[in-house]
Image (tube, grey):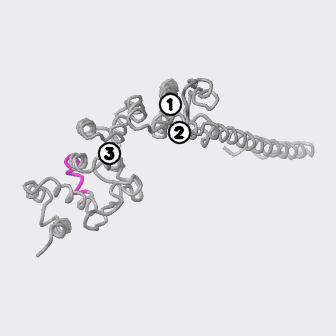
Amino acid sequence: ELGAHQALELAVEHITTFEPEAVLQALASHGQHWQHSYLKLLLHSDREAASAHVALHISLTAQFEPHALHAFLELSSQTRSGPGRAAARVGYDGGEDDEGHDDDCDGTILGASTGREDGDIDRDNEALAMCRTTGAWHAEAFLLQRQGHLKESVQLLLRELGDVEGAIRVASAVPHGQDLLAGDLGETIAGDALRDARMLSGLLARLGSGGGPPIRGSPGLSPASLLARMPARLEAPRLAAKLAQALDDGQANRDLHSIQLQRLKQAISSVSLRTFATQRRGRAMPAAQS
């Protein structure tokens, strides 16, 4: 006699015989957990078949694995033409389930399209409500960013999760030509960091490793500016070490820039000398290639 998971695997292997819709209806009376397990197996086996049930899958993931919802939403937003193992890249179900099955899935799936249609927007709004109900903050921030609510996304990452790195990623993704928005997001990050010692420490570490302001139009996001604005009673962990590292990184970047500039000058000088020698001999110069 087949066990429960073996029966699910058999149904997934023979979807022409066991149609997913019929299987999901049959599993409903046994609990949504089994529907969730079935959809994860189906996602691994047949992404086209799984894409027809993406709304249910999102709902079940929010209910049973809210910690994995962010990764699942990223996976569902990938385009069909994307190469490689999208699930592995975003970390959705990268391990094994309770029965030892590898639930990692490959490819880019779930019917994502290049445009945002009404169905996609409605699905995002439903998923957003689920995120707020289950406390899936990372997933909520991802959806807010996808809907264009960048400031709300940054504030959520900072104030609910203390995720400076995530907030910087959102702010750095602002399209060119919107420097005012990028600067506003950068100021939001700096302002929140200056009210929280651990967040400030993380931001200083990030700026030190990045070698400069990571967001366009945000001069306030620099170690010097943050230190000048730092409240007197705020004690950031290992502040001296992080500032020293930032200074060292800044000096290394200046040295690298100086070396590159010197090499560029040498290359220009060499080209100039060859051009001058050729003209002195009266030889025609070849036409520039377009």
Look at mark 3 in the image and give the residue it sits on.
Answer: 113
- Residue 25 position, x and y percent, is 9, 55
| Residue picked out by circle 1 | 193
Which region shows up in magenta? Answer: 48-56
Give the alpha-carbon distance from disc 1 to disc 2, as whole Å: 9 Å
Q: Amino acid at mark 1?
A: Ala
Res. 120 in view: no
Residue 88: % across, % down: 39, 58
Find residue 152 and report its image quarter: top left
Q: Check whether the beta carbons of the residues at disc 1 and disc 2 lie within 8 A of each other.
A: yes
Picture coordinates of residue 118, whole percent (x, y): 24, 36
Q: Residue furthest bottom?
A: 1
Q: Which residue is mark 2?
A: 202
Rendered residue at 8%/58% (across/down): 26
Q: What is the CA distance from the residue labelled 3 to the residue labelled 1?
A: 37 Å
Q: Amino acid at mark 3?
A: Ser
Dot in front, 2 or 3: 2
* Residue farthest toward the right in the current orientation of the protein: 280
**Amino acid at pointer 2:** Gly
